[in-house]
Image (cartoon, grey):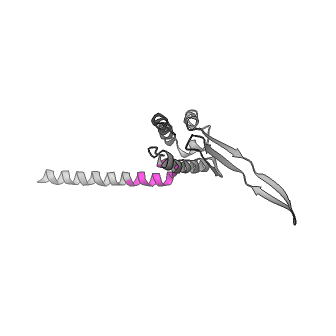
Amino acid sequence: MLTAEKIALIQYALDNIALLTQKQLADRIRTPRPFDDFWVLGMDCRYLARQVRQTVTHRGFVEKVRPAAFYAECRILSLDCFATGPTRATALRRLFVALRNAAALNAPTLVVPLSLCEPRKAARAAKADRFADALDRAATARDAERDATT
């Protein structure tokens, strides 16, 4: 069971990770500071090489190929989850989606930022908010001008 202080620490780490760009998230070297927040979350992302497994059947040899992929996992008590992806960023994004789903069940007060799970959707929402703010400022300026002329 997660305590309130542990949830606050996890939330702080998620908010710090949300400040990273997608390029910084995809590459360990580009991060402005060490992955301390990933350590707090118990997260690890590693590369798994392509594996070929041969089995013998009645028809002869059968090869099963597991393609190369990145494997990301989170080892928090009740939020234990993992994800795979062809790139590091994809694996981490899928991990954050899995973490959001696990948090919905086990720690409903924990909020995974949308920019980590779905960056395109978050960018569209931010653009829509900026557009709505610009329309609001224009309407306010028009009303102020109308009041000034009367």
Looking at the image, the residue that sits furthest to the left is 150
Q: Residue at x 56, y 50 (%)?
A: 98
Q: Position of residue 117 (x, y in %)?
A: 52, 50
Question: Magenta stretch mostly in which secondary structure?
Answer: helix
Q: Is residue 125 magenta?
A: yes
Q: Say whether residue 75 is left or right of residue 57.
A: left
Q: Position of residue 90 (x, y in %)?
A: 60, 50
Instruction: Quadrant for residue 36, please give it.
Output: top right
Q: Position of residue 106 (x, y in %)?
A: 50, 46
Q: Residue at x 77, y 57 (%)?
A: 65
Q: Residue at x 58, y 35 (%)?
A: 39
Labels in figure, total: 0
Looking at the image, the residue that sits furthest to the front is 1
Q: Say whether residue 34 is left or right of residue 63.
A: left
Image: magenta residue range: 114-128
Q: Is residue 134 magenta?
A: no
Nearest to the observer: residue 108 or residue 30: 108
Nearest to the observer: residue 125 or residue 148: 125
- Would you place residue 58 above or below residue 107 in this image? below
Q: Position of residue 99 (x, y in %)?
A: 54, 47
On-image quarter of the C terminus: bottom left
Q: Residue at x 34, y 54 (%)?
A: 132
